[in-house]
Amino acid sequence: MTDAAAENRTKSWAEVAPRLVAVAAGRAAADLVIRGGRLVNVQSREILDGWQVAIAEGRFAYVGPDASHCIGEGTEIVEAEGRYLIPGLCDGHMHIESGMLTPAEFAAAVAPHGTTTIFHDPHEIANVLGLAGVRMMHDEALLQPINIYTQMPSCAPSAPGLETTGFAVSAADVAEAMAWPGIIGLGEMMNYPGVIHGDPQMLAEMAATMAAGKTVGGHYASPDRGIPFHAYVAGGPADDHEGTAESDAVARVRQGMRSMMRLGSAWYDVESQITAVTQKGLDPRNFILCTDDCHSGTLVHEGHMNRVVRHAIACGCDPVIALQMATINTATHFGLERELGSIAPGRRADVILTSSLTELPIEAVYARGQLVAEHGEMRVACPHYDWPQSARETVRLGKVLAASDFAIAAPKGANAVKAKVIGVVENQAPTRALTAELPVIGGLVEGENGVCQIALVERHQATGKVVNGFVSGFGYQGEMAIASTVAHDSHHMIVVGTSREMMARAANRLGEVGGGVTVWKDGKELALVELPIAGLMSDRPAAEVAAKAAAMVEAMAACGCKLNNAYMQHSLLALVVIPELRISDLGLVDVTRFELTELFEPTA
């Protein structure tokens, strides 16, 4: 363990129990006492006026109406001045890489928003660097002043036989990771067809997780809630965040799963599902709020879990219930109810001071009893891992790409074709499987009427392979292209454009800088976000990355795109486990059937 990890290590209850008992009994002085506030008790769903907390060794020692007996000569006293004391917020399912930040910079971005616990699944880096990459994320997470628990990725590739990743995760990898100190469970089980059909590897991964007494994350993206859904649940996944409707949430909790409702940068699935609680009256303790994917701009300008809780309240949820969904419910789900998620004796002293339960301004944030952020500013450091060169040299194109690599040849003799088109759905993860009549000019198929080209460029093994197709919904105009090495989940390079020349330039540019996102129009680069670590993340501060990301969004708009958070849609175009139509390094994928499909419809 490094010095920084040792410094930020949370002492176990067993190590500090004698001191906690002594402080609670008045025999020893607390390190910190917070008084004069209104305590939100998520255990009993009460607001307790005047209750005080005494903190020692980074944990709550006393929680009650009067902590004066815990105060000694060296005790720091904080006057809450009528503000609410709420538990630190927990994100039950998310991917740090989606913020384009390393764990250290992500922690620095979200702690001022009141997030003190994260359960993250680093399956993005697993697809690029395998188990070694997961270990890097895990090790940097342990350095942080907030709690970052790691879920061992389950599916790399996410759909075997339909894509090729840089590395593959095995059942042996999962079993090995279960012994790491920061591993909390198995990441989202995206290969739901594998579970349904009894795939030995998927079952072995879940068995290893359960044998370690840890939680299996779920991901059931199919709308079919019949026999396949029941077979999936029988396999062991304990939660699911892929619901988009009230009926999805109801179906999951009825089967003993926790329904995770997400509000990310592009996923707006809380409003459509929270009615299961607010109107249908289901037990709210089986519902959890999460973000799934938040990019740096959202984190810097809008918030993190505080944003999700505010949104849930705006959707009609009682504020204390909304807080339960972002604190104690999450902790209980992962077997950590005695460790965090509430303001109660023995728990980690993660607490927020706020003057409003509905607006939720985050005025002070304590993590493990330490003031980590105040009025939007970090008060402590977030240590960095020493990322090796192997993590910074992951974009291998194999050749300099040319416009001809992005040409789509028409069937011989055709003057027009009926092509399959990936249809983007705003603010939703699923796509539509569309068709379009497209013209043939000089033997090549051309996009028109909002249909532009999409290409997947292999970037792990330097094969030089390019798979081409069509996509609609972005609204791009003129000669443009956008390329990204963030391409869930295989994380090859995705290029979308209206000009083959611009597509080649954009792809080659990312090869030069080692990964990221670039936008080109009329022969010029309008924006560039460098992501040198695995082609996914930057170790620069969140505000700096957010500024470049904002310039990227503006550049996309300058190319005609009007979608909300269109980059998130772009980055999911290769996600071959969410219906209906996707692209991979093996071809076009029909995700309703989980099989490769031809680009052109057969002619009569």
Image (cartoon, rainbow, N blue to C red):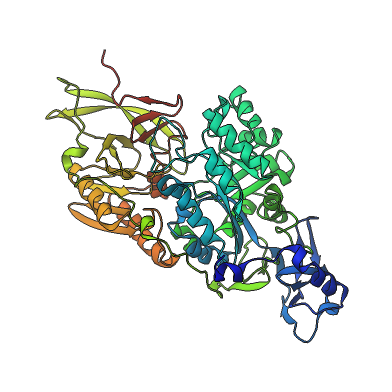
Q: Is residue 381 above or below residue 327?
A: below
Residue 332 image position (x, y, % from top left): 72, 50
Q: In the current view of this chain or complex, which residue is farthest to the bottom?
A: 73
Depth order, front residue of 261/111: 111
Q: Which residue is drawn at 76% across and 68% down?
A: 16
Residue 582 image position (x, y, % from top left): 39, 34
Horizontal side of 338 relative to 98 (left or right) equals right
Q: Which residue is drawn at 45% across and 24% down?
A: 593
Residue 64 location, quadrant? bottom right
Horizontal side of 419 relative to 115 (left or right) equals left
Depth order, front residue of 73/39: 73
Residue 282 location, quadrant? top right
Residue 374 image position (x, y, % from top left): 59, 74
Horizontal side of 328 relative to 582 (left or right) equals right
Residue 420 location, quadrant? top left
Q: Can residue 122 be seen in this view?
A: yes
Q: Can residue 50 be seen in this view?
A: no
Residue 407 image position (x, y, % from top left): 19, 35
Q: Is residue 112 above or below residue 502?
A: below
Q: In this view, does 169 lie above or below 198?
A: below
Q: Is residue 383 above or below residue 268?
A: below
Q: Residue at x 67, y 38 (%)?
A: 257
Image quadrant holding the C terminus, namely top left
Image quadrant holding the N terminus, namely bottom right
